[in-house]
Image: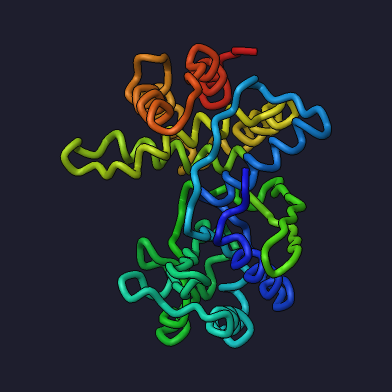
Amino acid sequence: MSYLVIEPHLYELLEHAEAERFQLLIAGGLGIYLKRRWVARETADNGRRNLFDEIPDARATDDIDAFLGMEIFLREPTDGVVRLRAMLKRLGYEPFEKARYFQFLKERDGGGKVKVDLHARLPRDGETNHIKIAPPRLGRSGHSAFRTLHAWATPEAFAIDEQVQELNLSLTTNAGPLAATVRIPHPFVSLCMKIKAALDRERTPPAERLPRDDKHAFDVYLLMSMLDEPEFAQVQQLASQFVHDLAASELPDGVRELFADPGRPGCATIRREMKRTSRLEPDLDRFCPLLGELFGGTSAL
């Protein structure tokens, strides 16, 4: 896969964030796209063995979904949200008026815009001091600090800090070579977020559904198809570790509702999306029991 036009902007963002001691995790469609490209390279060059023989291509994206560490909001504002906002401004990002102050836009070279969408998990015990939550927003308490910068509170990202994966990526652009270490969530975390998004989509009345939301069920399939056996075992371990987390409690029912067998509505969405975007047929007879094993407790391997 070729690189995306937003990737130079991603590498620039990560370089400046590292210099400022801000650790960003790249999630969403971009994180999945980068993982897909890394898996293809590892499979070709190093013999990586994935659970699925055929893996569909990831969709392209123009957004950077970045998860902020909770410590950014626990620092004094001048060392946390104020400094992060100043860094974004130096890079040319301004608040998106319809989603202040967790989405930021900048003009992209050659036309178009790059959007940075900030997210955060909910605070845990011992982290609630100085944190303000005004659903769906989370930020540093205090009127001025909260209105400087905050994040989209994401309950289903409860395990975002666990077993973070690092991808060493490089690309060659017209301006020369670029390289970066991109931190992405563990597949367990991405699966939790995508299952929740797919569940929200399928439970939305058909007349109110947006076509772009079909991507969520497809991404669940893509994430599963990219797993190798060590990652599968890690997902099992994390699912057991967080089984009593409130945000995790609806996932098993959601998996059964959407993906228990190839006739379920989530699987119909996967078939429709793959027919539209890929030459591949989804292997739902393998996908459904494997996902059920991870989130339902039955053995499929």
In the image, residue 165 sits, relative to residue 108, either above or below, namely: above
Residue 12 in the image: above or below residue 29 = below
State the residue in front, 16 or 11.
11
Q: Is residue 181 above or below residue 218?
A: below
Closer-to-camera residue (136/10)? 10
Q: Residue furthest right?
A: 46
Q: Residue at x 55, y 60 (%)?
A: 5
Q: Quarter of the image holding residue 15? A: bottom right
Seen at 69% across and 69% down, the residue is 175
Q: Is residue 296 left or right of residue 185?
A: left
Front position in the image: 37 or 69: 37
| Residue 253 can be seen, yes or no | no
Quadrant where the N terminus sits is top right
Total marks in image: 0
* Colouring used for the render: rainbow
Q: Position of residue 285 (x, y in %)?
A: 50, 12
Asked whether residue 227 appears in the rendered view, the answer is yes
Relative placement, left or right, of 217 versus 55 is left
Task: Name the residue: 57% across, 55% down.
Answer: 4
Residue drawn where x is 49% and y is 66% of the image: 116
Percent position of residue 122, x then y: 50, 58
List x then y, in percent, for residue 144.
43, 87
Q: Residue furthest front?
A: 174
In the picture, which quadrant includes the C terminus?
top right
Residue 254, given in percent of the width and then of the height, sits at 39, 30
- Quadrant housing residue 183: bottom right
